Image (tube, rainbow, N blue to C red):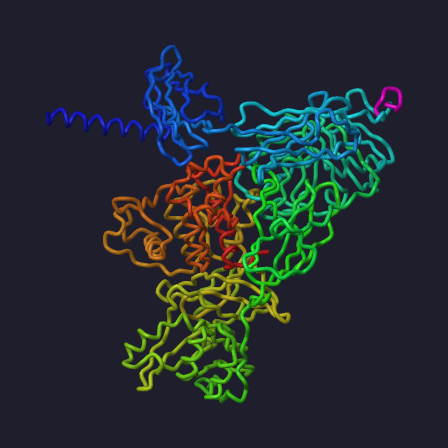
Amino acid sequence: MKLHQNQKKILCVLMTLILALTMSGINIYTGYAGGSVQADLTTPKSRQVFQPGSSVEIAGTAQGIPEVSIAVKNEQGVLVYSAQPAVASGLFASSFTLDSGAAEGEYTISLSGLGLTVKKYKFVVSYATTEVKLLSPSSGQAFKAGDVVEIAGTATKAKHLAVSVRNSKNGRVFVAQPAVANGSFATMFTLPADAVAGDYTIAVTGAGMAAAQTSGFKVASTGEDEPGEEDDSWKKPNAILFITGSGVSKKVSFTRDELESMEQTMVLYSTTSDMPQDKWVAAEGVLLKTLLNQAGAGGAKMLTFQGSDGYTITFTADELLHTIRYRFPDKTEVQPIIALKRVEGTSNFGEMSASETPVLCYGQRAKTEQTLLGFVKHLEYITVSNSAPGQWAKPVAKISNKEVTQDSEVASGSEVYLKTALGSNIYYTTDGTTPNLDSKIFNLHGCGPQQGLEYPIVVNTTTTVKAKAVGRGKRDSDVLSLKFTVPGTLENTGVTKTTVDEKNIKRELVSLENGRKEEKITLLAGVLEDIEKGEQGSSLTVASTADVDEVIMEVPAAALQKAREKGMLLEIDSLIGNYTLPLDALSLDEIAAGLGVKPEELSMNIVISKATEDVKNELAAQVREGQQMLVDPVEFRIEITAPNGKKVEYKSFGGKYVERELTLGDNVNVNQATGVLWNEAKGGFLPLPTRFETRDGKNIAVILNRTNSLYTVLQSAKSFSDIQDNWAKADIELLAAKMLIAGKSENIYEPDSNVTRAEFAALLVRALGLEEGVLKAGQFQDVAGTDWYTGSVAAATAEGIIKGYDDNLFKPDNNITREEMTAMIARAARVAGKEDNLTAPEQEEQLARFNDREEISTWAAADAALAVKAGIISGMPGGEFSPGSNADRAQSAAILKRFLVYVNFITAQ
C-alpha cells in the first residue's frame, strides 16, 4: 500500500512538472507529427449563448498530441467543468450540462495540452439572450448626401455593441462601438457629398447575440456623378487618388507611380491614449499638404476623405491642417501624410507594406484623442470644400435627468452628467479654467468599448464646471459654464493662510562664526490670538525678509500645543527657502517621554540654514559631469526642547511627506531638474519628489520628503543611443535626468528588455524618495543581504508596496507582469498620500471594460481598478487588460512617469 501511494505521489509530481513546462511554452512531447503541436476549438462558436441547464458541446481539431485538457470557468473564476478528451483522427470532443442555476456572464474555455500554449475561448450563459431592437432609422427610410444618419435602438443583456454600415456596393461606410446605457444605444454619422446611391445595410452585433440585427435605409442619388454630367478628362486612366471639390482651383489625379516618385516622408504615429508598442502606426508616404498644394487648395475649409469601399471621414481644415498634431507620449510634432506603405501595431518601419494603401494618417492633438478609426484605408477621393464648417452644440448639464441651465444650489454628492450631440466628445474642468484637449474627457476614451460611457461629475463642494464639445468636421462648441453651490462649502479648497501679526513676533539679528548672520524669530504670547482667529487646518505663516545665512523660529510650548489642536500647518517663508510643516506629523508623545516631560511642555525651533562654504564645496565636488547645481544647498532642521533644557533633533516624519521650497534662477528645465538630498551614508545624492512652480515671476522647487536634511536642486540632460526612435524616448530621458532610472550602460538603455520584480521595486522606492531599508532575518529566502536590490526590497516591503509569495519567496529575478506592476503602483500611490478606495461595485465598473476581466487575479483586482481609474494604466487595443503579460523597460518608464504625475510628485512639460 505504501509503495502504491509513493507511485501515485511520483506520478503527481511528474504531471505537475509536465504541466509547468507546457505552460512555459516548452514542447516536451515530440512523438507526434514531428513535434508539431496544434489545437483549436470549432465548437462552441465565439460568444455563443447558452441558457442554464443546456448542454455545451466542446469540440475541435488537434495534431501532434494524444489528448487535450479542457477547463471551463465562469465569470467569477469558478471552475465548472474539466476534461481530457483523447484526440482521434485529428478530432476531439467533450460535453457537459450547465447547472440549472448557473451564473450568468462570460465563460472561459481554456484549451491546453502537452507542448501546446494555452488558448482561451469564450461563450455566454444567459437566461435571456441579448436582444437588440433598431428604432432609428426606420426600415427603408430615405436619405440624401450630406444628411446625418442617426442609428439608435434598445438592447438587453449587453454592455456595448458593434455597429457597421455598408453601402449598395458593400463598401464600409461607418463603424462604431456605442455603449448601452439604461437599455439604449445611439451613434451617428454624416453621408458624404458623393455618397453612393442605393440600399444601405446596418448590422448590429454584440456579445450574447445569436445573429446580427440588421436593417436598411436608402440613399438617393445626388445626380452629381451621373454619366455625362461631368468632364472626366482630368482623371488619369490608372489613377488611384483623386482630389476634387469646390475648394480646389483645379482637379487632380495621381497614379501610384506618380505618388511614389514624389518625396517620401516616414512618420511614426501614436493613435490612442495609452502607449504600449502595439498601438503604433509606422507609415511612409507623401505629405498631405504637398498634394493639396498641387490642387490649389489654399482656401480649403473642409476636407472629406473617402475610401474605395465608401468609408468616409470629414475634417475641418483648421483641425487637420492648421492645428499642430503630435506623436505621444514624447509630444513630437507630426504631419498628415497619404501613406503608400504602412503597418499597424509596431514601430518597425521594416514591416511596412503597400497593403490597403493609400491610407490617410495623421497625429493626435492630445493624448485623449483617438485617431485610428480615422485612418482612411483604400483612400480614393479627397473632396475639398470652401464652405464654412458648422459648430458643435454646446453641452448641457443634467442632475437626475433634469437639465440645469443656470448656476444652482445642490446637495453634496450630487451627480452631474454632461450631454452633447452624438459624434463629439466633451472635455471639462472643475477648477474654473477653460477646458481644452488636455482636460478630462467626460465620455471616456471616445472610441472602443468605452464610447458613450458616462461617469458623473460628483459635486461634494462648491464647484464650477466648464465644458465644451469637440469632434471631427465641426468647430468646437461654445463653453458651458455652471457653478454648483453646495451649502456650507467653499469653492477654493486650497489651504488658507493665517499670517501672524507682526506685534506678536520678536526679531533679532545675530552674528555667527565666519561672518555668517542669523535672524532669530520668536513667537510671543499674543500669537495665541492669531491661532484662535485662524481657521481649522489653516497655515500659520511667518515671513522673513532678512538677507541672512540662517533663519531660526522659536515656537513656544503653548503656541505649539494650540496650533496642533487646530490641525494647523506651520509655515516659514524666507529668502533662503520656505518650509511648511504639518504639525500632526510630529510624534511628540514619544519625544516627551524620552525627555521626561509632558507633550504640552515641549517647544520647538525651526531652522533654515544655508550650507557653509566648506559643505557647499564638498557637495559641489560630488556633482557628476553634465550635472548642474541650480541652488546652494540648504539645511532644514527641527529641534524639540524641554523645560529642563534637554533638546533633541526631530529628523523623521514617519509616513508624512513634508514640503520645503527653494527659489531658483531662470535657467530651469523642469524636465531635467530634480530636488535631491545629500545621503552621507551612501556618499551621494538621493533624488526626491519635486514639483516646479512659478510665483511672482520666480521659479520655485517644491521638494517633498519624509525626513529633514541638506537639500539642493540638480539639473542634467541624459539620453541613450538606442531610444532615439522609441515611443517612450521623452519619458525615459525625463526620468533619467531626474536620476530615477538608469541605462544598462552609459549609452544603452535597452527599452525592449523586460523588467524584473526587483528592478521595478527599486524604481518605485527611488521615485518615492524612500531610503533603503533592512530586511528582517529570513523575511525572503531568495533575497540575500548582499544583493544590489536588498535595501529597496526591504523599503518597499515595509511600506506595503510589495508582498512575497508563499514559503517566504520574493522571486526578484522574475519578469514583472502587468497585474503585478499595477498592484505595486496602486500601493505606492497610497504611500504617496493618495488614499483612494473603491467599493466593490466601483471596482467592477473599472474592470468590467476588459474582455479578459476574469483573468485578473483576485488579489490584484482592487489595486488594478484604482490604477485604471487613475489613468496610470489601461487596456490593450482589443479591450484586454493582459494581466499576465510582461512589461518592458520603455513601458515601465511611461507608467512610472504617469504615476508620478498622478500623485503630484513631479512637474513635466
Q: Quadrant of the N terminus?
A: top left
Residue 151, horizontal then vertical, whole percent: 67, 33
Q: Nearer the viewer, residue 467 or 676?
A: 467
The relative height of residue 852 versus residue 692 in the rendered view (above or below) is above
Q: Is the magenta stretch mostly helix, strand or loop?
A: loop
Residue 864, horizontal then vertical, whole percent: 44, 46
State the count of labels.
0
The relative height of residue 393 versus residue 222 in the rendered view (above or below) is below
The relative height of residue 541 versus residue 716 in the rendered view (above or below) is below
Q: Quadrant of residue 16?
A: top left
Residue 665, horizontal then vertical, whole percent: 59, 69
Q: Quadrant of residue 642?
A: bottom left
The relative height of residue 892 versus residue 685 in the rendered view (above or below) is above
Residue 451, horizontal then vertical, whole percent: 60, 40
In the picture provided, is 241 more to the left or to the right than 43? right
Query: Residue 231 in magenta?
Result: yes
Q: Nearer the viewer, residue 452 or 687?
A: 452
Q: Quadrant of residue 286?
A: top right
Query: Residue 156 in magenta?
Result: no
Q: Which residue lies furthest to the top in this view?
A: 89
The stretch of residues the image draws in magenta is 225-232
Q: Is residue 257 visible?
A: no
Q: Is residue 579 visible?
A: yes
In the picture provided, is 862 more to the left or to the right than 270? left
Q: Which of 51 and 352 is in front in this view?
A: 51
Q: In which quarter of the image is the C terminus?
A: bottom right
